[in-house]
Image (tube, grey):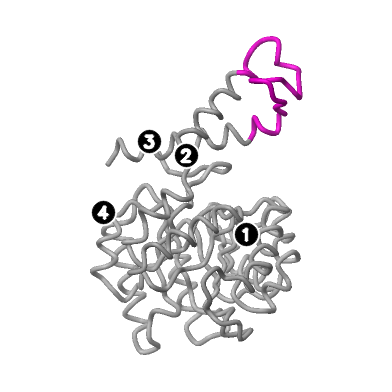
Amino acid sequence: MPVYSENVRLRRSVLSVPAINRRALEKTHMLDCDAVIFDLEDSVAPEKKAEARDNLRRFFTETPLRGREAIIRINALGSEFGQEDLELVRDLLPDAVALPKVEDVSSITGLEERLAAASPRLRIWAMMETARGISSAVEIARSANNAESRLDCFVIGLNDLRKDTGVPARPGRTYLVPWMMQVMLAARAYGLDVVDSVFNDFRDSPAFEAECEQGRDMGFDGKMLIHPAQIEAANQAFGPASEAVEEAQAIIAAFARTEAQNLNVITMDGRMVERLHLVQAEKLVAQANLIAERRIRA
């Protein structure tokens, strides 16, 4: 059983793995991350692009990733590598293709046109990492508001955004938070998931954990990671707490009672609970069940 469905997914920990690194590719089978981005872009030198594509073709053919989402991040379609990357995606059919530096709706619709013959299960993740992209977040997210859209998730890329804007890397990301929330609101308005940016110093565990907590409190679904050492903390921060799961189960049970079948609002333990809380509770419990099922399989 996959760890995601059309409505319920686990994207707490999204590990980026350079496609040029065959040893790292093989290690993904043993890791407890929810998704893997197999990177053909920033982490692969120009002279190594062809080798990286060959590595991915071999990996997907011989030992494909099981039980987690597999995403291939391609180079820009207008680059000298984009077309061959896209042909690889069409051949391998991962769960999603991540498009870097998305700046307008045409970037998404153009990619969708080139994927028209591919399986409808092949989704698009948009990397939001430039000033123009952040400024266009609502319009880009709105393009997902039709049944034919493949757009599924935003991923914020702060390293490129800092470079583009000149905002320095400071603890707490103070001056970046408004832009991050802008992307968050756009994603939520049109039903997209949204993943927080990488934290560059994987050895600084306390600072990484603090940033995970910040991302969770801002409403992100998970965090993009650069090292396996970051997986556990991300899963902990973005996963459902046991107390929250228990409360969610209680809400589901309360609305399941005969007398509550046609009610939009009920009273539970002295507080008002709306049916919208039932939808949230069902999603939370479904996520907890997916985590438990993966632990059993492991």
Looking at numbered disc 2 in the image, what kind of residue is underneath it? Ala
Q: Residue furthest bottom?
A: 47
Residue drawn at 52 percent across, 42 percent down: 5
Query: Mark 4 to mark 1: distance in Å?
Result: 29 Å
Query: Mark 2 to mark 4: distance in Å?
Result: 24 Å
Looking at numbered disc 3 in the image, what kind of residue is underneath it? Ala
Assign a secondary structure to mark 3: helix
Looking at numbered disc 1 in the image, what kind of residue is underneath it? Leu
Say which residue label 3 marks.
Answer: 292
In the shown orientation, is residue 215 left or right of residue 209? right
Vertical arrangement, residue 12 with respect to residue 113, above or below: above
Expressed as whole percent of the image width and height from the top left, the position of residue 30 reads: 26, 54
In the shown orientation, is residue 264 left or right of residue 114? right
Vertical arrangement, residue 141 with respect to residue 286, above or below: below
Q: Earlier in the sequence, mark 3 or mark 4?
A: 4
Say which residue label 4 marks.
Answer: 30
- Do the numbered discs 1 and 2 sit on residues whose CB atoms are within 8 Å? no
Query: Mark 1 to mark 2: distance in Å?
Result: 29 Å
The quadrant in which residue 134 appears is bottom right
15 is within the stretch colored magenta = no
Q: Nearer the viewer, mark 4 or mark 1?
A: 4
Say which residue label 2 marks.
Answer: 241
Q: Which of the pair 106/61 is nearer the observer?
A: 106
Q: Earlier in the sequence, mark 2 or mark 3?
A: 2
Assign a secondary structure to mark 2: loop
Q: Residues within 10 Å of mark 2 (few under 14, many from 20)?
A: few
Q: Earlier in the sequence, mark 1 or mark 2?
A: 1
* Part of the protein shown in magenta: 254-279
Please state, as top left, top right, bottom left or bottom right, where the C terminus lies in the image: top left
Say which residue label 1 marks.
Answer: 151
Query: Mark 2 to mark 3: distance in Å?
Result: 13 Å
